Amino acid sequence: MREIRLVACDMDGTFLTSGRIPHPANIHAVHNLVKTGVVFCLASGRGISTMRPLLAKLGQTGPLVSSNGALVTGLHNETVFETQLSSTITNVILDYAQTKNIHVNRYHQDSITFSQSGRFADLYASRTGLTPIIEPIDLMRQSPATKLLFIAEPEQILSATTELHLNPALNSTSLVNSEPDYLEFLPGGINKGLGLRKLAEYLDIVPAQIAAIGDWYNDLEMLQWVGYPACVSNAAAEILQISQYKLPTNDEAGVSTFLNAIIEAKSEGIVLP
């Protein structure tokens, strides 16, 4: 009999409403879930510092899968896994951004810096509540990066994705579209699925005992890896296809529907089909 011991959940578009705030029903369901002994983990492309406010509302200290799996922390905020881009790869990415005048965010541990002020800095700040710290690209070159993020119009993001996928210098780099106006750069092989696997190994939990909920393409590997893949009904088409459980939308607190089903099944001593 398979028992769910860990639930991983994306934030934007999944746990959060379209207004980028947590639905109260989702928070309530998480509180009830963890009382049953199930571990709840936020798994996001966000930097870890912009995930912690929601974690606090959930009354938890961890775990977190942040930066699309490049930084993972445990139940008590201990580092479970961390990686970063090489300086060579960082320079290739920043050269492109500088040539095309694309806004860049740099992530490392608790730090998120912005290459410039302006519309895209304001957009990211409005989505995350983060106060922009400006670090021009020439200074970014001198700093470690867990990941880099381009923010631009969706058409420019599409063009950059196509062009940089063809750049042989980035063959060992993971390129991820986490929003229509975001392009993320991670060390090769890094994704939420890998980050969740590192956490699960650390907690001694097998994939068959894990559920995950997502909505976008950067959730793909995570949903493919777990025993119980679920998505909100506002998810991208490919995510809808691979998800075993289709939930109400993020604005309808779809996450709470799934968590409450897990709680009910656990109380009755059964497993989800």
Image (cartoon, grey):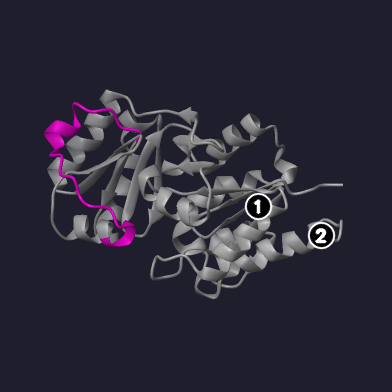
- Asked whether residue 144 is drawn in magenta, I would say yes
Principal secondary structure, stretch drawn in magenta: loop
Say which label, 2 or 1, has the lower sequence index.
1
The residue depicted at 67 percent of the width and 64 percent of the height is 258
Which residue is labeled 1 in the image? Answer: 34
As rendered, which of 175 and 137 lies closer to the eye? 137
Q: Which image quadrant: the C terminus?
A: bottom right
Place of residue 106 in the rendered image (x, y in percent of width and height, measured from the top left): 27, 39
- Asked whether residue 145 is drawn in magenta, I would say yes
Indicate the amino acid at tag 2.
Ser
Q: Which stretch is magenta?
A: 126-146
Asked if 180 appears above or below 93 in the picture, the reply is below
Indicate the amino acid at tag 1.
Val
Task: Specify whether 114 is left or right of 185.
Answer: left
Q: Secondary structure at mark 1?
A: helix
Camera sees residue 255: no
Question: What separation in Å lies between label 2 and label 1 (alpha carbons)?
Answer: 13 Å
The residue depicted at 19 percent of the width and 33 percent of the height is 140
**Residue at far bottom of view:** 252
As rendered, which of 180 and 257 lies closer to the eye? 257
Q: Secondary structure at mark 2?
A: helix
Q: What is the crowding at mark 2: few (fewer than 14 residues within 10 Å), some, or many (at least 20)?
A: few
Camera sees residue 97: yes
As rendered, which of 189 and 69 lies closer to the eye? 69
The residue depicted at 13 percent of the width and 42 percent of the height is 99
Place of residue 228 in the rendered image (x, y in percent of width and height, measured from the top left): 70, 53
Which residue is labeled 2 in the image? Answer: 267
The residue depicted at 62 percent of the width and 63 percent of the height is 29
Image label count: 2
Place of residue 186 in the rendered image (x, y in percent of width and height, measured from the top left): 39, 36
